[in-house]
Image (cartoon, helix red, strand yellow):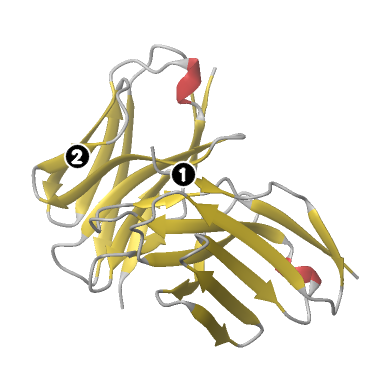
């Protein structure tokens, strides 16, 4: 069974700090990786995707991928209270059929 | 631009009653469509996906069913709801070279009492 694991949190960081969210996956053949942000009571929103090993930056967000270690992370620089949400890691299963989601990590950014 | 519509936003149903949730997509043709459920403490669970009219794949055996009567319409149904069917139901469509990027509708919060 393909699994995506995340620490449920909450991860608490002060405003302006760097938040680091981590995710591991079991399907070694996975090629595409995604981070979704979900505010309470709302639907998930795609914020980052990464396909190759290394870092990918988009504004305050950086996604990091290490396929050898089967590890994906999301860094949020200069964290803001509006970043407080649950962050879901998702992995495209080998064979390019469907996404498997982790249960999410709750991030709390305090002013 | 593409948009996805899902309704109703909230629904309270008694055990044993039927269910019908509808989702429509605008601004694209022949999209891959998905139904997910998010229950407390369980994360997002893929229920059904469809690559075309009348083509439905089921990921989890349960008392739910899905249909795709038109290209951009996806319906989730049940003949008799169970307490365990409570949850946040999300319709989604996908884009990308391998249809890997999912975009979700606003969701339906279903409470079965």
The quarter of the picture where residue A62 lies is bottom right
Q: Mark 2 points at which residue?
A: B57
- Position in image of residue A48 (x %, y %): 51, 74
The chain identifier of the residue carrying mark 1 reads A
- For the residue pair A98 and B107, the one nearer the viewer reads as A98
Q: Is mark 1 on a helix, strand or loop?
A: loop
Q: Name the residue nearer the viewer: B28 or A23.
A: A23
Residue shown at 62% from the left, 70% from the top: A74
Tag on residue A100? none
**Can you tell which mark lies on residue A3?**
1
Can you give x and y, in whole percent of width and height, for residue B16 in the image? 39, 11
**Count of labels shown?**
2
x then y, percent, for residue B46:
37, 42
Q: Are marks 1 and 2 on the same chain?
A: no
Q: Quadrant of residue B66?
A: top left
Q: Is residue B54 above or below residue B41?
A: below
State the residue lying farthest toward the top. B16
For image coordinates 52% across by 83% down, the residue present is: A56
Pointer 1 local density, CA inside 10 Å: few below 14, some 14–19, many at least 20? some
Q: Is residue A27 left or right of residue B49?
A: right
Q: Residue at x 39, y 18 (%)?
A: B81
Determine whether the residue tagged by mark 2 lies in a helix, strand or loop: strand
Q: Image check: A110 left or right of A60?
A: right
Relative to A70, say whether B1 is above or below: below
- Indicate the quadrant containing the N terminus of chain A: top left, top right, bottom left or bottom right: top left
Q: Is residue B85 visible?
A: yes
Q: How far apart are the alpha carbons under marks 1 and 2?
A: 20 Å
**Which one is in front, A70 or A64?**
A70
Q: Which chain carries label 2?
A: B
């Amino acid at each position: 069974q393909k699994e995506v694991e995340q620490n449920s949190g909450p991860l608490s960081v002060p405003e302006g700090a760097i938040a680091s969210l981590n995710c591991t996956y079991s399907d070694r053949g996975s090629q595409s990786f995604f981070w979704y942000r979900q505010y309470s009571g709302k639907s998930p929103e795609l914020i980052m995707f990464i396909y190759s090993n290394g870092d990918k930056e988009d504004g305050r967000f950086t996604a990091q991928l290490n396929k050898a270690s089967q590890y994906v992370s999301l860094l949020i620089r200069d964290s803001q209270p509006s970043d407080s949400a649950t962050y879901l890691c998702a992995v495209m299963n080998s064979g390019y059929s469907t996404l498997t989601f982790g249960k999410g990590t709750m991030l709390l950014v305090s002013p | 631009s593409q948009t996805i519509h899902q309704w109703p936003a909230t629904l309270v149903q008694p055990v044993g009653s039927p269910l019908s949730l509808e989702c429509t997509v605008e601004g694209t043709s022949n999209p891959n469509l998905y139904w997910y459920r998010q229950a407390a403490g369980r994360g997002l669970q893929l229920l059904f996906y469809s690559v075309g009219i009348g083509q439905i794949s089921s990921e989890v055996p349960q008392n739910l069913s899905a249909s795709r009567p038109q290209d951009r319409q996806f319906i989730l149904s049940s003949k008799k709801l169970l307490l365990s069917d409570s949850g946040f139901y999300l319709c989604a469509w996908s884009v990308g070279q391998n249809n890997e990027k999912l975009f979700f509708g606003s969701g339906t919060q279903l409470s079965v009492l």
